[in-house]
Amino acid sequence: ILGIGMAIAINDIDTLKRSLINLATMIVLSLLTAFLFFWLFPLSEDTSELLGRTAPDIRDVLIAFFGGLALMVARTKKGTVAYKDFTANRKRHAPNIREESRRYRVDPALVMALIHTESAYDQKAVSKAGAVGLMQLMPKTAQHYGVKDRTNAKQNIKGGTRYLRHLLERYKFDIRLALAAYNAGETAVAKYGNKIPPYDETQNYVKVVVSR
């Protein structure tokens, strides 16, 4: 559902199709699993806990959908040409992503999912917090990893991938924690005992990137 909201936000038909297929698959699997479970272990009576867990709540669906939509809108400037030309930019930057992923031994699919979520492949994207470029680097992070021009795609990908590798090593290759730190900062992760901080944006961010 998050993926559907993200796809609509960036007008990405391919992602929308994949998200709809994934949603349909999960619904079918959930129904089959529930059927088999209750067939093997039938309940003699309904309990308040069971009724509470199985009661449909449209609010959860709406939160997930608009969470994905709002996350993408908040992370990028929709007025730029690069934002609207998502597919072409993804193809154009793919070689650099693969090159830097090999250099720093990071899964290129993870880097692409992160860039997709951070900037929708708009190398001139600027967030409200001041993060810039494909991998939305903050000034201090860019300086630390030798990025002089954050709008330069090659420099941004190199610096962002190096930073991601650092986070993966720091959190013993726990992808979710590394992504949480990329979004909220290493200090925030440490503050909550090396767990994903309870921030709505960070929680949604991790789910979206991992689902790609």
Image (cartoon, rainbow, N blue to C red):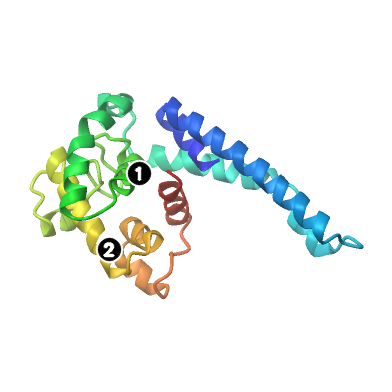
Q: Residue most toward the right?
A: 44
Q: Where's residue 125, x and y in %?
A: 26, 37
Left or right of 120 on screen, residue 63: right
Relative height, residue 193 to residue 182 (above, below): below
- Sequence-wise, the earlier of marks 2 and 1 is 1
Q: Secondary structure at mark 2?
A: helix
Residue 53 position, x and y percent, is: 74, 57
**Amino acid under disc 1:** Ala
Marks 2 and 1 sit apart, C-alpha to C-alpha, by 16 Å
Q: At x 23% / y 59%, what residue is drawn?
A: 165
Per the rendering, the mark at residue 113 is 1
Front residue of 42/197: it is 42
Number of marks present in the image shown: 2
Residue 94, quarter of the rendered image: top left
Residue at point 28%, 46% (across, down)? 108
Question: Which residue is farthest bottom?
Answer: 193
Q: What residue is shown at x 46% (from left), y 46% (from top)?
A: 211
Query: Residue 201 vs residue 85: left or right?
Result: right
The image position of residue 187, as x and y in percent, is 31, 69
Amino acid type at circle 2 is: Leu
Identify the residue at horizontal 24%, vertical 41% (top origin): 134
Q: Quadrant of the C terminus?
A: top left
- Locate the N terminus and report the quarter of the image it occupies: top right
Name the side, left or right, on which 150 lies relative to 12.
left
Q: Is residue 56 visible?
A: yes
Q: Which mark is residue 167?
A: 2
Q: State the mark number for residue 59.
A: none
Q: Is residue 138 visible?
A: no
Residue 206 image point, x, y percent: 42, 53
Q: Nearer the viewer, residue 143 or 28?
A: 28
- The quarter holding residue 177 reads bottom left
Dot 2, crowdedness within 10 Å: few (<14), some or many (≥20)? Answer: many
